[in-house]
Image: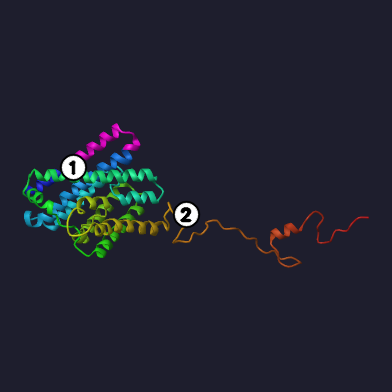
Amino acid sequence: MASLNVSLCFFLATFALCQASRRAAKALLPGGAYAHFAREAAGAAQLGACCLEMRMLVELGPWAGGFGPDLLLTLVFLLLLVHGATLDGASANPTVSLQRFLLAEASLPRTLLELAAQALGVHAAGALTRLYWAWGLSDLHVLQSLMDPHCSSALRTAVPHGALLEGSCAFLLHLVLLRLQGSRAVHRVLAVALLLTAAACTAGPLTSAFLNPALAASVTFRCSGHSLLEYVQVYWLGPVTGMLLAVLLYHGRLPRLFQRNLLYSQKSKYRVPRGRPVPGPGGSQTPEEGSRGRGPGSGGQPLSSSH
């Protein structure tokens, strides 16, 4: 269990450092620079470092450390809970940033800045985590440091199947995010943690269930086994397609691109009142017609001209 204790210390140190960087950036930087860049970079770095360490435990832990699947899934769920509670409103996920843009909740410059911050954060986390592995603080880290230059692909199924899995899981994730958009933060964090843990349990053995293009690019694009185009199809096009379908299903349109609802018909909530027919000598007529027919001096007799 010494290797597990070292990994737990790594997780705690990662959360503490990223939280300290968030507070420092919030105090020193303008609001826009913090919200659209520093917060996203810190969140992506936190996610990337924890994902790399957790992936090492999943791949090496069962045979080198004796870790069971129940322990690993519990650890994944707890990490997701802490991660969601400490993000401070950041998405740390390009598809979530693109979703905000398509919902007209974020401008194009803000979205591009968030995407750049997320890419910078996960790649910095990858470099620092591999440097930490090189210290060899545990047997698992020694093995991982030796195996990392010859890493194996996280995609362990056919490309269409992998893209379908990533897209389906991303579709469910974004549908949950849209449904819980106005709910309390604790409910969103718990729901997302449960969903991502279930995705890690079902799709994890086949694609690692990244559901995050920036994270997948940092972790597995450098590994042999598949071409760059195949990785892009699975880990970029799959989640983006799932996000688009979730927004279309929930809103019926893409607000940034279409004003008209493409899926659902909209009925007016106001009804135009209709007059009831009023029986009269000349037949039935509406009150409006009757009132229009009565002018000054109209009493059912035609007006005679005075001589």
Could you tell me which quadrant the C terminus lies in?
bottom right
Question: Mark 1 — residue?
Answer: 14
Q: Is residue 95 above or below residue 15?
A: below
Callout 2 secondary element? loop
Q: Nearer the viewer, residue 132 or 4?
A: 132
Give the label on residue 259, or none. 2
Residue type, label 1: Thr
Q: CA distance from mark 1 to mark 2?
A: 43 Å
Q: Earlier in the sequence, mark 1 or mark 2?
A: 1
Q: Is residue 121 above or below residue 199?
A: above
Q: Could you tell me residue 266's position as x and y percent?
A: 49, 59
Give the label on residue 2, or none. none
Write down the quadrant of residue 258 in the picture.
bottom left
The kind of secondary structure the magenta stretch mainly shows is helix
Q: Could you tell me residue 203's position as x and y percent?
A: 22, 61
Callout 1 secondary element? helix
Residue depicted at x 15% and y 45%: 129
Instruction: Give the residue at the far top of this rendering.
Output: 28
Disc 1 and disc 2 in contact, CB within 8 angstroms: no
Q: Is residue 10 visible?
A: yes
Residue depicted at x 73% and y 57%: 292
Q: Is residue 82 visible?
A: no
Magenta span of residues: 11-33
Q: Is residue 119 left or right of residue 2?
A: right
Q: Could you tell me residue 284's position as x and y percent?
A: 71, 66
Q: Could you tell me residue 269's position as x and y percent?
A: 52, 56
Residue depicted at x 34% and y 56%: 243
